[in-house]
Each structure stands twice: as C-alpha cells, then as structure tokens.
Image (spheres, grey):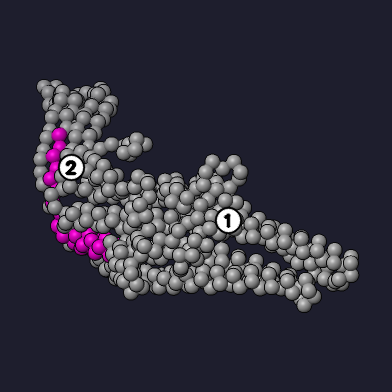
Amino acid sequence: MSIVARRQWIALVVTAAFGAGGAGAAGAQTLEAALVSAYRSNPQLNAQRAATRAIDENVSIALSGYRPRISATSSIAENYYENISRVQGANGTLYPVASGTIGVASVGGTVTQTLFNGFQTSNRTRQAEAQVLAAREVLRSTEQQVMLNAVTAYMNLLRDTAILELQRNNVRVLEAQLRQSRDRFNVGEVTRTDVAQSESRLAAGQSSMQLAEANVAASRAAYQQVIGSAPGRLRAGAPVDRFLPRGRAAAEEVARAQHPNVLSAGYNVDAAQFQVKIAEGALLPSVNLQGNVQKNWGSAVSPTVIETLTASVGAQLAVPIYQGGAEYATVRQAKETLGQRRLDLDAAREQARAGLAQTWGALETARAQIESTQAQVRAAEIALNGVREEARVGQRTTLDVLNAQQELVNARVALVTAQRDRVVNSYATLVAVGRLSPQVLGLSVSNYDPVVHYNQVRDAWTGLRTPDGR
C-alpha cells in the first residue's frame, strides 16, 4: 500500500470511527485499550484461567503419594457382661453367675507410608506436570481467541459505523436528487417516470440505512460482550504485519512448531505415555510401612482389666498375581489412548498449517482488495460527476445518475469492508502462528502468569483456602 493510499485509508476509518460514540464520549478509545480491557475482564478467559488453576492441583494430588497417611480413631461403649462358671465344691458342683456393665473407651492412631508402588507415584506426578503444561497451552489458545474476538468486535463496530454514515449520506443525496427531479418534472424537463425512479431509490436507501443502524446496534452489543465495556468513540485500528514471520513458508514452520494447539497436543502425548507406565505399575509389587498405636480403658472380655496400651510397626509386601484381568485391560486401553494422542498431535500440526495457509491467503487478499477498492472509489467518483454533468445537458437520464450514485456507495462500502478485513486478517494470521499475546503486542497490562499459582500450590501439604483467599 502506498503512503498516500495508507493516509487516505486511515483518514476514512478515523472519520467513520468518530460516529461510533455519542457526543458526550470522554475521549477516543484505541484498539490496544480494548484488547487490554478484554484481557482483564473477559469471562471466557477468566474461566479458562480458573480451569488452569484447578489442573495445577493435580500435581499436589500426585505428590501426596510420597507423603504419609495418618488417621486417628476413638470409641466409647457401655458393655454388659454375664459369666457363668463351674466350681467343684464340698457340697458338689456349683455354677456361680457374675454379671454387670463395663465402660470401655479407646483411642488410637495409624501411620502408613508407601515405600514402593511400582513407580506409580512418580509417573502420576510426571503425568500431572504434563497436564499442567497442556492446560497452559489451552489457556494461551483461549487468550489468543479472546483477543482476536476483541479485535473483530472492535473493527466490526468501526466498519458498521462507517457504513451507517455512508448510508446516511446516501439518503441525503437521494433526497436532494428527488427534490431536483420533482422540480424538473414541474417545469417539464423530466417525466413522472424519473420522479418514481428517484422515489424508489430513496426508499431503497432508507431501507439500507435502517439495516445499517441495526448492524451498528448488534456490533455495539457484541463489543460490550467481548471487551466488557460500552464502546465510546473508536480510533482506527492498524494491522500487525510487523510481528509476522517473513514469508508464508516460514510462517507455516512457526505455526507447526509454536501454535498452542500443537504444543498442547504434544503434552497430551506425554501424559498418555505416563498413563501407560502407571497402568503397568499396577502389575508390580508394593511395599507399605505401617505404624499403629492404641490405648484402651476397660475391657469387654475381662472385667479385671483396667487399661491396655498396644503399639506395632511393620512392613507389608503385596505381590499381585491375578486380579481378574482388569489390570491387563487397563494397560491395553492406555496404549490405545497413547496412539490416539499421537494421531491428535499429527492432526494438530496439519490443522495449524492449514489454518495458517487460510489466514495468510485472506490477508494477502485483503491487501489487494484495499488497492482495488480505492481505485474503484476514485473511478466511481469521477463517473458520478461526469454523469451528473451529462444529465444537466440532457445526455443522461435520472436513472443513470441514480445508478452512478449507487455504484459509488457500493464502492465506498467495499473499501470500508476491505479496511476492516485488512486489520482483522492480520491479527488472525498472528493467531495462526501462535504469537498473539500482550507481550508480543506490547500492551500496557499486567500479564497473567500461571506459573505463580502453580508454585503456590505444588508443595502445599495442608490448607483449604486457595491462594487468592477463597
């Protein structure tokens, strides 16, 4: 795009953008400010951040397999006893009966420590860490999509506001044209047909203006939904081509290697590999160390016992031999899932490549469309001026003027649409290579770092509150 064309483009979009807000708008809002607002407050993005924090806890859950398990018990009971004994006395055999109630209370504690469980704990920990990394890439993908949605909503509102202004101007021109046709009809220069053509074209222009007003209302609602605030006056948005790789081939390589969907699929492969090892670990022996202590007051079987204290420490070895075949099925199932995850990775790479090719082609098309539509607008303006002059001397009809006016409106609408597509497609291409982020764009916003929460909860042994106090 030439420098002159770029200035014309920015001037047109800025002019249209000032119609997006009311007269009381405090100041023009930039696309960067809208992206900051969406990054901070978009509910979809915040929900994904919460989901990522929940997955962080899987590592702490897996690490609990290394830690001891402690339990305490306590009981109290009232027991009734009745003993009948046989006593051989001088007068023969006697059968004395002893009965009564005894209160029995006990407290105890058990400590169990796993010494070996077929490496299941270590593999569960590695699997959880892979899941955390995959969740971070899903979060990055969500961030990209939310920011692209914000750009789309912003530019859609700019486009629709500019189109509404064009349609309003068109209605004003058609109203003037209708008045002129009626004046000329009154003096006999044109026929009733010319007046009817002007009236028909004015009605069509008013219908287009009403549709444009509805589109602006819908775009304003979409803007507030994605960005989280009502739009004011909007400034022009600019493409972000400077952040893209040089050339389509280089961009495809970056997309296949760095797109968050590809990286997430790779971490899912790692998690599936550890799941196979976890399942195989169920076939190995396990060793547990257990300590137990119990204090009893009273005895349900011996009224003469006042209190007892018992304690024990021991190790238990369990060797699985056959548990019905479920463990073998679990291993086979995990291997099939691993194969599926590897295929998912291949599909993600191809999807990234295809998505990049699509957005890159759309971006190149938008660049070409701007130049062609600018030429179309210039030609349509020249044609309309010429037709009007020819109509004044009787060489053109009213219909010719109306058609030339409509062609100019269509050309200007096409230019505004191409300008919108130019910006949106540049951001979409940045998403396709996996580089749309506040850090790359240099936005003035505090970046959300999922590592902070991970470090806060990874080694937490106890506690019910989340790090943010909930």
* Rendered image quadrant of residue 432: bottom left
Evaluate whether residue 397 shows in this view.
no
What residue appears at the point 49 percent right and 65 percent down from the top-left corner? 4
Occupied quadrant, residue 320: bottom left
- Mark found first going from the N terminus, 1 or 2: 1
What amino acid type is highlighted by mark number 1?
A: Ala
Q: Residues within 10 Å of mark 1 (few under 14, many from 20)?
A: many
Identify the residue at image location x=73%, y=71%.
389
Q: Which-is-in-front pick, marks 1 and 2?
A: 1
Residue 176 on the magenta segment: no
Position in image of residue 340 (x %, y %): 32, 69
Instruction: Give the class, few, some or many, for how many residues have Cα within 10 Å of label 2's Cα (few <14, many ≥20).
Output: some
Residue 351 disc label: none
Q: Which residue is mark 2?
A: 68
**Residue type at numbered disc 2:** Pro
Residues at circles 1 and 2 in contact by the CB criterion of under 8 Å: no
What is the CA distance from the residue labelled 1 to the residue labelled 2?
Answer: 68 Å
Magenta region: 268-293
Q: Is residue 146 visible?
A: yes
Q: Is residue 196 left or right of residue 211?
A: right
Q: Secondary structure at mark 1?
A: helix
